[in-house]
Amino acid sequence: MEAYEIFRDLAIIILAAKVFGVIAGKFRAPQVVGMIIAGIVIGPSVLGLVKQSDFILQMAEIGVMLLMFVAGLDTDLKELVKTGPAAFAVACAGVFVPMAGGWLLYSFMYGFSPLGSLDFYKALFIGVIMTATSVSITVQALMEMGKLQTRVGTLILSAAIIDDVIGIIVLTFVIGFRNPDSHPASVIVNTLLFLAFCAAFGFAFYYLFKFLDSKYEHRRRIPILSLAMCFGFSYVAEHYFGIADITGAYVAGIVLCHIRDSKYIAEKMDISSYMLFGPIFFTSIGLKTTLSGFDAGLLIFSVGFVLVAMIAKIIGCGLMSKAFGYSWSDSLKVGLGMMTRGEVALIVAQKGLTLGLLQEKYFTAVILLIVISSVSVPILLKLVYRYDKR
Amino acid sequence: MEAYEIFRDLAIIILAAKVFGVIAGKFRAPQVVGMIIAGIVIGPSVLGLVKQSDFILQMAEIGVMLLMFVAGLDTDLKELVKTGPAAFAVACAGVFVPMAGGWLLYSFMYGFSPLGSLDFYKALFIGVIMTATSVSITVQALMEMGKLQTRVGTLILSAAIIDDVIGIIVLTFVIGFRNPDSHPASVIVNTLLFLAFCAAFGFAFYYLFKFLDSKYEHRRRIPILSLAMCFGFSYVAEHYFGIADITGAYVAGIVLCHIRDSKYIAEKMDISSYMLFGPIFFTSIGLKTTLSGFDAGLLIFSVGFVLVAMIAKIIGCGLMSKAFGYSWSDSLKVGLGMMTRGEVALIVAQKGLTLGLLQEKYFTAVILLIVISSVSVPILLKLVYRYDKR
C-alpha cells in the first residue's frame, strides 16, 4: 500500500462518520450509533469502500485509550466519596445483576459450562459487556425535563460513575482469570501488584503534575505530558501486569482528575478524539460487523441480550434504590436512567474480541443494545415523570 | 507486534519530543530541532528504545498533511494580492536563487548530469529543499525588537508566504518531471488538470463550507469535515494527478483560508498536530538519521549546503529588495529575515526520500540548516538593527 492511500480511507471514514452521526442525531439517537452504521455502509458488507487494515485498527486502539483517559479525567473522586452508600450500592447492583443475567442468558442458550473453563468465561463476558452504564443520554433527558438536580438525578449520576469503576475492576479480574492455565493466585497477585503500582506511581505522577501545573498552567506541555502518561500506563498495565490496557488509561485519567488543569487536559484530548480517533474507532466497529452471518439463532440471542441487559438494570438498580428508602416511582426512574449503554460497552466488547472471549458476530447484539436503550430511555423517563404528575 | 505495543512507542516519543523540545527552547532554538534530536537519542543510533515502524511512518505522514493544511489555512490571499510586486519579486528570487545554488553545489561535488536525467533531478532537488522560508523565527525576533510592523517586516512576512506558494509549485513540477520515462507534456497536462480540478472543486468546497459556516459556525462539524476534505485533496492529488499529496493538503487549506471559521479550523488542527502527530513526524526524522554514515564527504557537503542555502537567500532576496528601492541596510535585513528554514524543508526532504530523489544521509544537512539558520538569524538581525542606530 502506498503511504498516501491511507488518506483515502481516512477521508471516507471521517466524512461518512460525521454525516451518519448527524443523521442519527436527527433521529435523537446517539452520534456513536450513526458512526457505527457509517462503518457498516462503507465497509465490506455494503459499499466495500474501506477495508479493515492494521493502520485503522491501531488508530482505533488509540481512540479507545483517549476515550477511557477522558472518562477517568472526568471522574470526580471527592464527589463520589460524598454521595455515600446509596450510590455505591445501586452501582454494585447495576454491575452484578446484569452480569449474572448475561451469564445466564448465554448459558441457557449454549449450555452451562463448568466454573473456570474458557466457555464459562465466554458466558460471563456477555454479562461483563452489560455492566457499564453510559449516562450521557440519561443526563441529557433529565436536563431537558429540569430533573437533573433532583435526588433521583444525583443518585443516577453518581451511581453511573461508580458503576464504571466497578465495571473496570470486574473486567480486570475476568480477563485475568480467563486463561485456564493461569493460577487464580497469580491473577490476584498481579492485580494487587498493579494496584500497588498505581498507588505508588499514581501519587508520584499526581504530585509531579500538580507541580507542573503550578508552574505551567494552561501551557501545552501539560496535556502533552499527560498523553504520554496515558499511553505509558496503558502499556505498563498490559505488558507487565497482564491487566487490560484500557484499565491503565482509565487509571491515568483518575490520577489526574483532581489537578487544576484536568478540564484543560480533557478538552484537548476530546478534540483529538472527536476529530479523528473517535470516528475511526466507532466506524471500525461497523467495518467488522458482517450482516451475512446473521441467522435466526443470533437474532434470538440478540433480542434476549437486549432485554436481559435492560431489565437487569431496572431490577438491580431499582430494587436497591427501594431498599435505600426511595419510593417505587423514584426507584423505577433510577432503574430506567441506568439502562443506557454506549461506547464503554463497545470498548469492553472490543477487548473481549482481541482476547478471544467474544466472537465478532455478537457485536450486532451490543450495537442493538446501544441503539434501543438510548432511543427508548428518554421516552420511558418522560412517560414515568408525566405519570407522576397526575 | 501486539496492539498495545504501539503505546510504548507513543509514550516514549511524546515524552522525549516534549522534553527535548523544551530544552531546545531554553537554548532559543526551535522546538522542532529538539524533537529531531529526541528522535536521534531514542532511535537506533543512540539508545535504541524505538524503531521506525509502518505505524510511526503513517502517523508521521498524517502529521505532515496537518502541518501543510494549517499552513494553507493561515495564508491570507487577499493580503498577498495587496502587498504587490515587491513581495512577489523577492519571493521569486528567494526560491530560484537557492534552487540554482543547491543544484550547483550538488553538481560541483558529484558531477554535472545532463538535463532531464534522474541525477539532474537529484541535484535540482537539493535546491528545492532550500527554497521554503519558515518565517516564524524571524517574526518572533522582529516582534521582540518591535520591528514587525515596519516596511521591512511586512515585506519579509509577505514574501515568505508567497515563497511557500511558489515553492510548492516548483516542487510539483520537479516531482512531475523526475521520471525519465514521463513525457514533459503529460506532466504539464497533469498539472494543468490538477489546477482545473482545484479551481472547480476548490470553489465548490469554498461555497459549501461558506454555507455550512453560516449555519453551524464554531460547531465541531466544520473542522471535522474540513479534515476529511484535506485528506481527500491529498489523496486525489497524488493518486489521480501524480501531484505530491502535500500539495493537495496545502491547496485544501488555501481553499478554506477565507471562510469565517478558518481560524477555528486551524486551531483544532493545531491541537491534534502539536499533541501527537507533529512530535511523531519530527521524531521520526531523528529516528531515520543514522550518525554512523557520517564521513568527511558528507561533512563537506553539509557545510556547503548550509552556507549555500543561507547566502543564496541573502543574495536573492537582498538584491531584489535593493532593486525595488530599499536601502542597502534594509535589503540586508530582508535577506537575513528570509534565511530561516524549518519544518517545510523537512517535509520537502521527506517527500524526496519517498520518491527516491534524496538519500537518507542528506537529512543531516537539512537538520543542520534548520538549527544553524534559526539560531543565527535572530542574532544577526539584532546586530544589523543595532548597527543601524549608530
Image (tube, coloured by chain):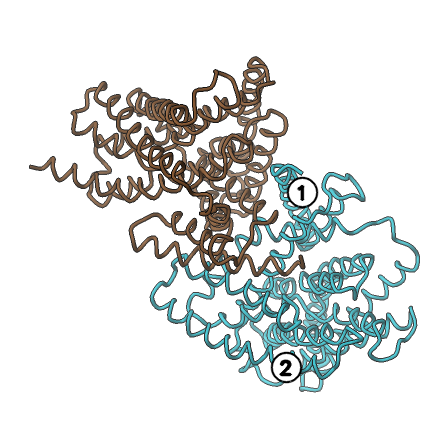
Chain colours: A brown, B cyan
Between A103 and A95, which is closer to the camera in this rendering?
A103
Residue at the spot of label 2: B88
User: Is residue A210 something that shows in the picture?
Assistant: no
- In the rendering, which numbered label is found on residue A215? none
Name the secondary structure under disc 1.
helix
| Nearer the camera: disc 1 or disc 2 | 1
User: Is residue A264 something that shows in the picture?
Assistant: yes
What's under tag 2, amino acid-wise? Phe
Name the secondary structure under disc 2.
helix
User: x, y percentage for residue A141?
Assistant: 25, 43
Q: Rate crowding at label 2 as few (under 14), some (14 to 19) or many (20 or more) other CA atoms within 10 Å.
A: many
Residue extending furthest toward the top? A185
What's under tag 1, amino acid-wise? Ala
**Quarter holding residue A146:** top left
Up/down of B115 relative to A207, above or below? below
- Residue at 51 percent across and 72 percent down: it is B255
Between A355 and B187, which is closer to the camera in this rendering?
A355
Q: Quadrant of the C terminus of chain A?
A: top left
In the image, is A322 to the left or to the right of A386? Answer: right
Residue at the spot of label 1: B16
**Quarter holding residue B359:** bottom right
Up/down of B316 relative to A47, above or below? below
Between A301 and B224, which is closer to the camera in this rendering?
A301
Q: Quadrant of the N terminus of chain A?
A: bottom right
Q: The numbered mark 2 sits on a residue in which chain?
A: B
User: x, y percentage for residue A158?
Assistant: 32, 30
Q: The numbered mark 1 sits on a residue in which chain?
A: B
Up/down of A339 relative to B96, above or below? above
- Residue at 50 percent across and 25 percent down: it is A172
Q: Are marks 1 and 2 on the same chain?
A: yes
